[in-house]
Amino acid sequence: MKKTILSFLSSLKLTIALLIIIAALSILGTVIPQQYGAGESFTRMSPGLVKTFRSLQLLDLYHSVWFIILMCLLSLNLIACSLKRFPTSWKLFTATPSLDRAKPFEDLSSDNIVMIEGERSGITSRVERLLMKRYKRFRRKDTDTATTFYGEKGAYSHFGVYIVHASILIIIAGAIIGSLWGFEGFVNLAEGEFTDTVYVGRQKSLKKLDYTVRCDKFSIAYYDNGMPKEYRSDLSFLENNAVIFQGPLLVNHPVTVKRIKFYQASYGSIPGGRVHITITRGNDKGTTLTLNLKDSFCLKENGAKVTIQRIEENFMTMGPAVLLSIHSSKANTQLWVFKDIEKMKRAIPNLLQKVPKFNPGLFKPYYFELNSIAQTYYTGLQVSYDPGVSTVAIGAFIIVIGFFLAFFSSHKRLWVRVDEQEGKTRIMVSVQSNKDPVGLEREREYLLRHFKKGS
C-alpha cells in the first residue's frame, strides 16, 4: 500500500496533470475578475453565474481552499520524486571509479591518442600539472608500465534538479504564507483626513494598522490636451503622534512602511469639501479665509469661536450654503451663509425677518460672505501586506542556481593513461559526461592540443 501511494505521488504523469490543471486555473483567474475587480463585472453577469462563481471560489481563485490543496499536492509530488531519485544521484556523486579499469581505454579511436617524443616521467609530470589545474577531484595511480589519472568536475550538476524542486517548494510555501496571513485592502482618504484602518474585501472586515496614515495633499498633473498625466498623494505615516515616514505616492511607485505597501489605486472629488469665506467687522476691510469642513477660527469679539458645521452645494434648492456654529461667552449661535443671499432677498421679501438663521450678519458686528465652494479630492489607496514575499524571493534566487546547475553544467569525467609504446610516450584520453556533448568535445580537444604542445 505504501509503495503504491509513493509510486502515485512520484509519478511524472501526476506532475504533468497537476501543472496542466494549475495552468488552466491560472488562465481562469486571469479571465475572471478576481476579488474587487469582480464587483465591477457583476452588472454584466447573470445572478446565477455570479452565484456559481462564488460557490466555486472562482472570484477569489488564488485564495481558494482547493487551489491551495492543488499546490500542496504538487509539493508532495515534488518531494516524492526527489526522495525516489535522490539515492541514484548521490551514488553518482560519491562514486570513485577504480584506476585499474581498462574499459575506459578500450576501442579508443586514434583521435584520442597522442604519441610524444620524450621521457615518460617528464611528460607524466606535465600531464599531472595540467589536469590538476582543471580538475578539483583528481587521483593518480602509478604502476611499472603506466600512470593513470582520473579527474572529474561538475559532479554537483546531479543535484540541480533537486535544488529546482526545493526552490519551487519554497516559492509555494511563500505563496501559501501570503495567502493565509497576508491581506489586501482599500481606503479612501480626503485631503487632511487620516485613518488607522483599511477595508479588507476578501474577509469583508476592517483591518487595524499599527500606525496612522494621513493624506496631506492630493494633486493631479495634466497633459496639454487635458488628459491626466500624473496622480500624486503626499502621505504622512504617524506612530504615537510622531511622523515615522513622509513622502509622495505615485502610480507604479508604491510606498512601503513596516512591510505594508501602499499603491495609488484611484482618486475622486468630494463636493463641498472646501469653502472660501470673507468676514467683515463693521466698516473694516474684510478678511478672506479658506476652510475645510469642521475647521474653526476665532473672532475678536468675546473670544468667539466659529466652526464650519455643514457645507451644502445646493441647500433647499437655494444654492451653495455653509452652516456656521458660533460659540462665545454670551451665547451660542448658528447661522446659514448663502452665496446668493442678495438674489434670495429680492425673490423672497422679508426673508431675513422670517428666517433669522439665514441672516449673514446675525452675529454682530460681523458679516459673513460665502465666495465659493471648492471640491476636495480624495485618494484611493490599495494597501497590501504579503508576509510570504521574502520567502518567494529566496525561492526565486535559489531556482536560478538550480537551473544553472541542471541545464548549464555537466558532470565531466576524465581518464588519462600515460605509458610507453614503440619508443615513444603514449597518452590516451577518455572522457565521459552525463550531458553537454559539445562541451565534452571541446574539453577533449583542449586536453589533446595541450598534450601535443607539451604545456
Image (spheres, helix red, strand yellow):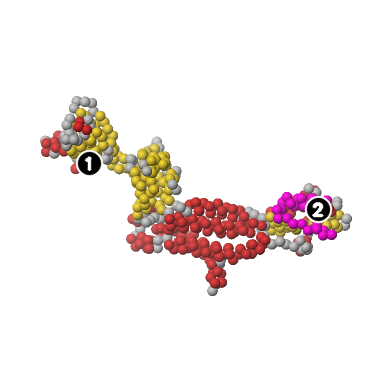
Residue 229 image offset from top left, x and y in percent: 41, 39
Secondary structure found at label 1: loop
Q: In this view, does 388 lie to the left or right of 189?
A: right
Q: Does residue 432 appear to the left or right of 36 in the view shown?
A: right
Depth check: give the residue in front, 349 or 142. Answer: 142
- The residue carrying pointer 1 sits among few (fewer than 14), some (14 to 19) or many (20 or more) residues within 10 Å by Cα, namely few
Q: Which of marks 2 and 1 is nearer the N terminus?
A: 2
Q: How many marks?
A: 2
| Viewer-closest of 103 and 148 | 148
User: Which x, y percent locates residue 77?
Assistant: 53, 64
In the rendered image, the vertical position of residue 11 relative to residue 276, given as above or below: below
Whether residue 125 appears in magenta in the rendering, the answer is yes
Q: Is residue 35 visible?
A: yes
The residue at the far right in this view is 423
Image check: 81 left or right of 178? right
Q: Which of marks 2 and 1 is in front?
A: 2
What residue did someone put label 2 on?
Answer: 124
Residue at 85% across / 52% down in the picture? 119
Residue 264 within the magenta-colored segment of the rendering: no
Give the residue at x 44% y 48%: 259
Q: Please report the bounds of the magenta region as a residue range.
A: 122-147
Q: What residue type is labelled 1?
A: Asn
Marking on residue 244: none
Residue 121: x %, y % from top left = 83, 53
Residue at position x 78%, y 58% in the image: 141
**Residue receiving disc 1:** 314
164 relative to 117 in the view: left or right: left
Q: Where is residue 201 in the image (x, y as percent from the top left)?
A: 36, 54
Viewport quadrant of the N terminus: bottom right
Image quadrant where residue 33 sits:
bottom left
Which secondary structure, mark 2? helix
